[in-house]
Image: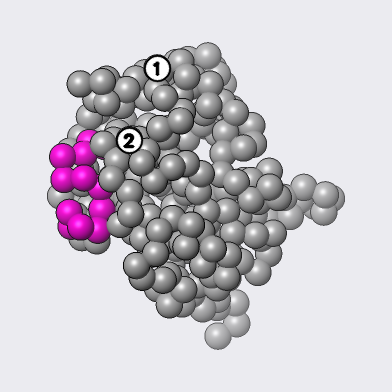
Amino acid sequence: MAGYVAIVGAEDFVPEGVGLDGLREAARGCRGCHLHENATQTVFSRGPVSARLVLVGEQPGDVEDRRGEPFVGPAGKLLDRAIADAGLDAEQTYTTNAVKHFKFTPAASGKRRIHATPDAAEIGACRPWLVAEFSVLDPEVVVALGATAAKALFGPSFRVTKSRGLLLPWPASANAPADFAHDDDAAHESAFAVATIHPSAVLRAHNREEAYSGLVADLTVAARALAG
């Protein structure tokens, strides 16, 4: 069929019984969906396996794609500031994305790459990596940054606009996908979850100060849960 893109999924590329370093190495060769064809490289994660807090975003951006690390571009710098302002310990934070390759469309000039939101099939194809990450992590709080991350973690019916800033049990809803609901495959059974906006939304906001304050307030909910 013309225009049809086959998406296999990452299952066959995810090794079993390895730690984060093994997952990162294996992810470099992932061909589970077509996004790897145009991306510079796989962008996996950053942070220690002992992290008490896990932040999950949407996908790497242009800067992240070139450097190979998540949240190192403008949105990442804003997130770092928000983490500090919320009283969180950056050294005990693990950051990753629901999708590990940069999805973009080229600008008419050909000089810029414009972010494109991953669709449900692409998120599902990359999902085995996220499941594998949680199989070796034991966070106390998981923060979903934006709608794509929230839906990847908690199911397609989850709405950040309705539930942002609330301290929710893990998994965060009855519609959460089953592979995150098992104690041995996901976060700690007593972990909490918080949903908030993606830091890039702050950069696009008409009132950046207000949007930033809202992000910090949501992250402060996570900080209080860790302190408690």
Q: Position of residue 159 (x, y in %)?
A: 31, 41
Q: Is residue 92 left or right of residue 162?
A: right
Instruction: Give coordinates of residue 64: x percent, y percent.
Output: 64, 46
* Among numbered discs 2 and 1, the one appearing first in the sequence: 2
Q: Residue 19: horizontal and vertical position, in percent?
A: 40, 58
**Label 2 Cα crowd, 10 Å radius (few <14 / some 14-19 / many 20+):** some
Q: 104 above or below 145?
A: below
State how far apart marks 2 and 1 are (Cα).
14 Å
Residue 136 visible here: yes
* Amino acid bearing label 1: Gly
Rendered location of residue 37, percent (x, y): 65, 69
Mark 2 or 1: in front is 2
Q: Which residue is mark 1?
A: 87
- Is 188 inside the magenta-drawn segment? yes
Q: Residue at x 74, y 55 (%)?
A: 106
Q: Give left or right: position of 63 versus 134.
A: right
Residue at (46%, 30%) from the top-left corner? 91
Quadrant, the C terminus: top left
| Residue drawn 53% across the image and 21% down it | 81
Along the viewing direction, whichever of 5 and 54 lies nearer the viewer = 54
* In the foreground, 127 or 68: 68
Q: What is the quadrant of the N terminus in the image?
A: bottom right
Q: Does 214 sit left or right of 164 as displayed?
A: right
Which picture quadrant has residue 17?
Answer: bottom left
Please name whichever residue, 116 or 41, is drawn nearer the observer in this view of the structure: 41
The region drawn magenta spans: 182-193
Numbered tag placed on residue 52 in the rendering: 2
Whether the magenta-drawn stretch holds residue 8 is answered as no
Question: Mark 2: which secondary structure?
Answer: loop
Amino acid beneath label 2: Arg
Q: Secondary structure at mark 1?
A: loop
Q: Quadrant of residue 136?
A: bottom left
